[in-house]
Image: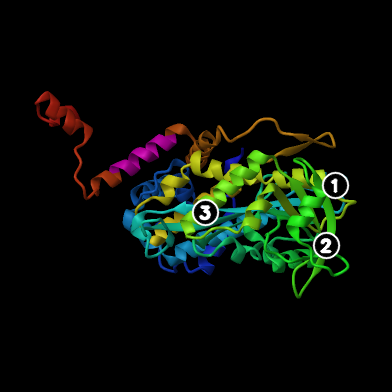
Amino acid sequence: MQIHNSSTFVKPSLIDSIARKTGWLKRKARAISPVSFVKSLLVSVATGDCSMRTIAIEAGILSESGGTVSKQSIDERLNSSGVEFIKEIVGQALRASAASIAKSPLGRCIPNVSRILVGDSSTLTLHDSLINDFPGASNQHGTTSAQFRFQLTIDLLSGQWLQTELDPYRRNDRAAAMDIVKTIVKEGDLIIRDLGYHTIESFSAIQDKSAYFLSRLSLSTKIIDLDGGKIDLLSFARKHAPRAGDCFAKEILLGGSKRFKCRIVVKRVPEEVAEQRRRRLNKDGQRKGFTHKKKHRQLQDWTFLVTNLGEDQASTDQLDELYRMRWRIENVFKLAKSHTKLRKIAKHRSNKYHVQILIWTWLLLMIGLSQRGMFRMLEESENRAEQIEHSVFKSIGRIIQWTALALEIAATGSIEALLERLREQLDYHDRYEKRRRKSLPERLANVLNTEISPLLT
């Protein structure tokens, strides 16, 4: 992975332009350049040490001209303009990611489909001191957490990140359903998302763009047969998929006043799966203080999907398997929370600007890795697609650590030069550290019960 060719994942000239556009770069003399600032943030989030002191040390190490950067200088740049600066860089990285996706072999497998986009969300819990800035969920005791909602859309085969957003926790997935339709969806895309994004408006908008959707069906949605008669979902499922494993598809009209044609897929699940779903329903009802209706509990025996893919594009079995591929994004979220420093970064105690900048920088790092094929499922070899057997999920933490080291070596030229710059930074920051800490020679002098001066010569 050649980090030095594009060490910030966005062209340096573009970073300078964004810094001026967002107001982060002032006309007065500056102690740190925009590129060095972004690099220092990338190294800090890669290592998980995101204090002002560490960012300042890395800014000095990664500076084009050398020298030192004070913590105060970093603090002055962790503001609302800094948030907009990093967000805009992430936006540019996402646009570059989308433009770099090579033509896939999907057209040979699913006619007229060129990309499969998988979307989902997860929550990030922040330090409790930020509850007023980022109010999140409340538990049964009424205690509220500080949280973001993290939206993500990836290209399934290449693994590249195409859309990501940090939303307020209380903006749910349904409210975010149209976001990707307005930004990244284009003709030939297939969008696979779960029930949380189910809206007739988004399905219709996707279809209007000559794109395709595949989603779980909301059991409260009105469905009509092609003759205009209302379909009772429970009776329909019992008739066409009575046994576990049965799968049936039929063209229907979806929606109320504004209707459009699509396919419904009904699959009977094993009894143990249905019982597990009912237990979750009961638990959810107890938490919210109500009981789900008997019919709703009975409908848990089936999985209901809706899609505008035609029979000539995908069979019922293919649709079932395609929807199962949504697990890939679940793995990405597990990777993000368990195998990188994201939880530590999000829990960092600081002001709201500092934390937002750290998380947006972490997203920039992950987008850059996705551009370099870290999460891809297929690769082209001799004009044919081959499944990638190995996985980066077990080694992603080490890969990110190596990325941080590569950034530092690329800036300094060698390990020796890196160590010299590090010594210079530590000398500077230790000298101005407000909290007086004993140096190693001083501690050694105490142990040996001797004067410090002979130990310093």
As drawn, which residue projects farthest toward the top? Answer: 448
Looking at the image, is 282 positioned above or below residue 79? Answer: above
The residue labelled by disc 1 is 315
Callout 1 amino acid = Ser
**Quarter of the image where the N terminus is located:** top right
Q: Where does the image place residue 278, in percent across and percent down from the top left? A: 59, 48
Q: Is residue 388 above or below residue 210?
A: above
* Residue type pointed to by label 2: Ile
**Cα gap from disc 2 to disc 3, whole angstroms:** 31 Å
Q: Earlier in the sequence, mark 1 or mark 2?
A: 2
Side of 292 relative to 238 (left or right)? left
Disc nearer the start of the sequence (3/1):
3
Residue type for callout 3: Asp
Q: Residue at x 64, y 60 (%)?
A: 197
Question: Regarding mark 1 in the picture, which secondary structure is present there?
Answer: loop
- Measure the alpha-carbon separation of dots 3 and 1: 34 Å
Q: Is residue 398 left or right of residue 254?
A: left
From which residue to which does the magenta span run? Answer: 417-427
Residue at x 84%, y 64% (from the top left corner): 225
Residue of label 3: 284
